[in-house]
Image (cartoon, rainbow, N blue to C red):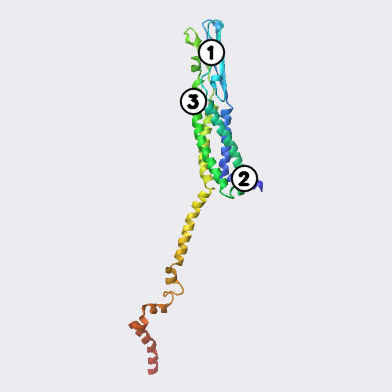
Amino acid sequence: LASTGTFRAVKEPLAFLRVLEWLFAIFAFATCGGYSGGLRLSVDCANKSESDLSIDVAFAYPFRLHQVNFDAPTCEGKRRETLSLIGDFSSSAEFFVTIAVFAFLYSLAATVVYIFFQNKYRENNRGPLIDFIVTVVFSFLWLVGSSAWAKGLSDVKIATDPDEVLLLMSACKQQSNKCMPVRSPVMSSLNTSVVFGFLNFILWAGNIWFVFKETGWHSSGQRYPPDTMEKQSSSYNQGGYNQDNYGPTGGYNQPAGFGQQANYGQVGEYGQQQSYSQSGPTSFANQI
C-alpha cells in the first residue's frame, strides 16, 4: 500500500515537480558551494635567478577574494611582495547557496507530506495555502538570488582574470620583465550553478499553478458556476412556464380547457356547431 501510494503521488504534477526542485536545488548549491579553483602566473625577471615561473593563486567559495594572498617576486634582488586579489563577492554567493539549501529542505519535506500525509494535507485549506505562499516566496527568491549570483560571478571572473592579476605586481610594470598567464581558472561549474538557479526559478514559478489548484480559492472558483446554474434551473422549473403550459392543470394537455379558456363552447358559434355535430347523427337515425 505504501509503495502504491508513493507511485501514485509521484505521478501527479505537484509531487513530480517537487522532486525535480529537490534535485535541481542539490545541483545548484553543489556546483556553487563546492567550488574551488585557481590560476597560475609566470614572472620572468631580467635577472633569471629572481624569476618565478609558477605562481599559484587558489580561491574558493564564498569568494572573499580580498583574503586570498599570494607571493610574487619584485625582480629587485631576493625580495618578494605579498599581494591579494581584489573584491568580496561572498554576499551574493552565500545568498544563492542559502536559498538552494532551504529550497532543498522544503522540497524534501513537501514531497514527504504529499506521499504519506496527503489526506491531512487536503483536509483543510491551511496546508495548501501555506504551500502556495511558500512556493511564491521561493520563486521570487530564486529569481533574485540567481540574478545576484550571475552578477557576482561576472565580477569574480574579472577579479580572477590572470591579466588583471598581473597588473597588481610591481615587477610586471617594468618592461624588462616578462609576465605571462600560465593557467586561467575553470569556471564551468560556476556557470552551471547560474543555469540551475534560473531553472529552479522556472520550476518553482511553474509549480505555483498546481499548488494554487489545491487551495480553497481555486475550489471556490470552480464551484461557483455550477451553483449559479442550479439556482437558475430551479427558478426556471418553478416558474409558470412549465406549470401553466405543460403541467397537469394547463389547458394544452387537456382539450376541454381550450374551450373553457376561450369560452367558445358557451357563447360562440363554434360551440353551437359542436352541439349540432353531436345531435345530428341521432336525428338522422330516427328518420331512417
Mark 3 and mark 2: Cα distance apart in space: 41 Å
Residue 249 place in picture, x, y as percent:
45, 75
Against 131, residue 64 (above or below) is: above
Type of amino acid at the residue the image marks with label 2: Ile
Type of amino acid at the residue the image marks with label 1: Ser
- Give the label on residue 115, or none: 2
Against 149, residue 47 (above or below) is: above
Residue drawn at x 57%, y 47% as measured from the top left: 126
- Give the label on residue 139, or none: none
Residue 55 place in picture, x, y as percent:
56, 14
Q: Is residue 116 found left or right of 185 in the rendered image?
A: right
Q: Earlier in the sequence, mark 3 or mark 2?
A: 2
Residue drawn at x 62%, y 42% as measured from the top left: 112
Mark 3 = which residue?
154
Q: Earlier in the sequence, mark 3 or mark 1?
A: 1
Q: Is residue 258 found left or right of 204 in the rendered image?
A: left
Mark 1 = which residue?
42
| Residues packed near mark 3 inside 10 Å, few (<14), some (14 to 19) or many (20 plus) | few
Verify CB contact (< 8 Å) between mark 2 and mark 1.
no
